[in-house]
Each structure stands twice: as C-alpha cells, then as structure tokens.
Amino acid sequence: MKRIATLILSIAILIVFGLVLPAQTQSKTNGPVFLSDNQLVRPANYREWIWVSSGLGMTYGPREQSGSAEPRFDNVFVTPEAYRAFMKTGKWPNKTMFVLEIRSSQSHGSINKDGHFQGDVVTIEAEVKDESRFPEKWGFFPFRGSEQSAKPASPATTECQACHSRNGAVDNTFVQFYPTLLEVAKQKGTLKPVPADSK
Amino acid sequence: MKRIATLILSIAILIVFGLVLPAQTQSKTNGPVFLSDNQLVRPANYREWIWVSSGLGMTYGPREQSGSAEPRFDNVFVTPEAYRAFMKTGKWPNKTMFVLEIRSSQSHGSINKDGHFQGDVVTIEAEVKDESRFPEKWGFFPFRGSEQSAKPASPATTECQACHSRNGAVDNTFVQFYPTLLEVAKQKGTLKPVPADSK
C-alpha cells in the first residue's frame, strides 16, 4: 500500500513538473533579455504577442512621405504580460516591451486591385521599460537588418525619447493611436494632458 | 507515514487540478461556440488571438473605394490553437476561426500629419472551419452592429464562399495577404495553384 502511494505520488509530482512548470517558463520568455552594455536580444516571437494596432504611412514630422507611391505599414506589438497589466490598470509595468515592425506595402497582387496590403519586413525597433536600467525609464532599440541584438539608441542623439516622452498619451507610449488601449486608459484615468502644440 | 504520503498526494492532486486544468479550460475558450441553427456566438476576446495582418482600403472587386477619402482598415485574427497547427503543418485544422475586423481610418490626430491610423470598429465578420457542420467545410458569419450572435451567411447568396474557395491561397483563406503565413505555406508546400484569371 505504501509503495502504491509512493508510486502515485511520484506520478503526480511528475505531472506537476512536466505540465505546470514548462507552461510558466514559456510565458516568461516574452520579457526583455539583455546582454552586456544594455544590448537587447532580438525578440524571436513578437508576432505572437498582443498586436495593438497598425497604421499606413504615418508621419509625425514634415510630410516627407506625402504622396509616396509606396507608404509603409507600422505594426505594433506588446508583450502579453504587459498587455494584461495595462487592461487592469491603464499603466505599463516595469519590463514592458513593445516591438514596432515596419513593412513595405503592395497594391496589386492576387485579386487585390486597390488599397494596400503588407509585404516584407523593412526593419524592427523595440521599446523597453526598465526603471533600474535606463535613467529615462524607457530604452529604444533599433535592430539593423537581421542583427540578433541591438544597442540602445542614445537619448541625447535620438528623437525617439524626446518625442515619446512629450507626446505619448500614456507614459512614454502612443496609446492615442491604439484604439482599444485608448478606451482603457480613458476608463482608468491614466491619459496624460495633451501638449498645447500637438493638439 | 502512510498519512503523510496521502496528505502529500492530495496536495499534489490539488495542484494538478488547480493549475493545469484551468489553463487548459482557458485555452479552449478560443474555439467557436454555436447556438441553435448554427448561430455563432460573438468571440469576446479575438483581439487577444494571433493577428496575421492588416490592410488599408483593399479592394477585390470593382474599384469602388478608389480615391475614397476615408479608406478602411481590415485587421485579421486567428485562434491561437489554429495558428500553432498552421505553423507546424501549413494547414488549417477543424474548428479554425478567423475574425475580420473592419475599422475606420483617420489621418489627422495628435502629432500625426499624414498617412492613416485606426479609428472605431465598423463591423466584424467571422469565418469558421467546421467540416461536420458546413457542407463547404467553412462558414461565414457577418455580425450586425453589436449583436452577440450571427447567422451563417447562406453560401447560395453570398460571394464570400465562392471567392474564398476560388482564390484562397491555402484552403479557403487569403494566406497570400498574410506575409508570415505565406512563407510557412511555401515551406510546407500547401499553397493551391493560382487561378489563371487572378494572377
């Protein structure tokens, strides 16, 4: 009887370690992974994160892309853990990571006769919230080509940080362009005041 | 000793049923749920499924939207279970469900000066593969307004079925417009021959 109990116990423990722990490990792989010098490892599975929105030919500065024959799509993804926290609180927790994926657009292909659908990846960039790692709390990481890691863009030399900090509707992020998250931020009261010159 | 073993066994079983089974139940809620008369329940959490791509102003028929001041975004999501199966096989399993979400577009707002970002939902439609339920294997469900269930569009009266069946790159689906899935289908050899008149 004691042997049978021990056997059943062993099987039960194996089930726990075999099923529960791998599931937990999998969910942890979405967070940012850093190498030396704050280099960020390219997130392999960002297309399986939560997609928050896409735009086409969006232009924040001078209208340089206006009239372009081939505007680009911007697709924005966020880690599932950060998304779930945002849905509850309207705020981004530490270790939040976004990926901005830029793709070419096409108008003619298969049965499509007008408008635009998505083509190849042009580049990806990541934005990570890490309050202990970055003085400005957020870091920006432009991945060059297919490089497997990216150095943080220097806040002093990039416009990313200044523009996101100034114009982000929630924290450092452009929630104003993510319609479902915008509704959550309104409900939770976490929208920042809008700068007078960007209304 | 026997009592301690029984106690540990009970705890282990509780852990298994407390952690593993809820996780499995949650993952099952993504599949299609039908009421009487094959009515499909509106999927509540489709924005948390796998997003496969978005287009803007895509036009399959006559160019009626051409030159439209307000083209619409089409966002396509698929259930995570079906996505994982497709990544392994290049095929859609039974119970695959897609949601097509149509949203308005905006050009001017916040700091954006050109191009388009996404606005409110206009409508959603679902496409479900259920080989035992539909003679054509796939059913189409246009949700009117905020209705919580949708009747299947009749294959005899809708163009959806005919167009998808004829032009879908994989099975009944427009994988030709989902760049990451298209690569998988090419690798797995599951692309259909392209109809001569839609090349």
Image: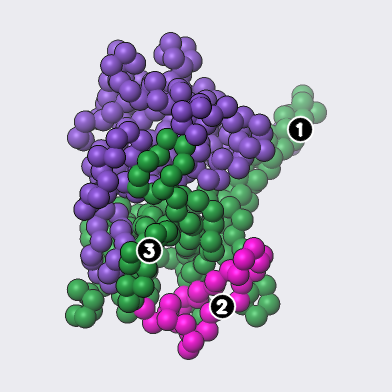
Chain colours: A green, B purple
Q: Which residue is mark 1?
A: A6
The answer to whether residue B18 is visible is no
* Residue A149 is a magenta residue: yes
Along the horizontal axis of the image, is A97 left or right of A91?
right
User: Which type of secondary structure does the marked residue at label 1 adopt?
Assistant: helix
Q: Would you place residue B196 above or below residue B117 in this image? A: above
Residue at point 43% right, 65% down?
Answer: A93
The boundaries of the magenta stretch are A135-163
Tell me the amino acid under the disc marked 1: Thr
Whichever of callouts 2 and 3 sits on the residue coming sooner in the sequence is: 3
Q: Nearer the viewer, mark 1 or mark 2?
A: 2
Q: Give the camera-side residue of A25 and B58.
A: B58
User: Which type of secondary structure does the marked residue at label 2 adopt?
Assistant: loop
* Residue A108 is a magenta residue: no
Whichever of callouts 3 and 1 sits on the residue coming sooner in the sequence is: 1
Along the horizontal axis of the image, is A84 left or right of A47?
left
Tell me the amino acid under the disc marked 3: Ser
Q: Which mark is residue A68?
A: 3
> Which residue, as the protein is rendered here, is positioned at the far front?
B197
Q: Nearer the viewer, mark 2 or mark 3?
A: 3
Q: CA distance from mark 3 to mark 1?
A: 71 Å
Q: Which residue is mark 2?
A: A152
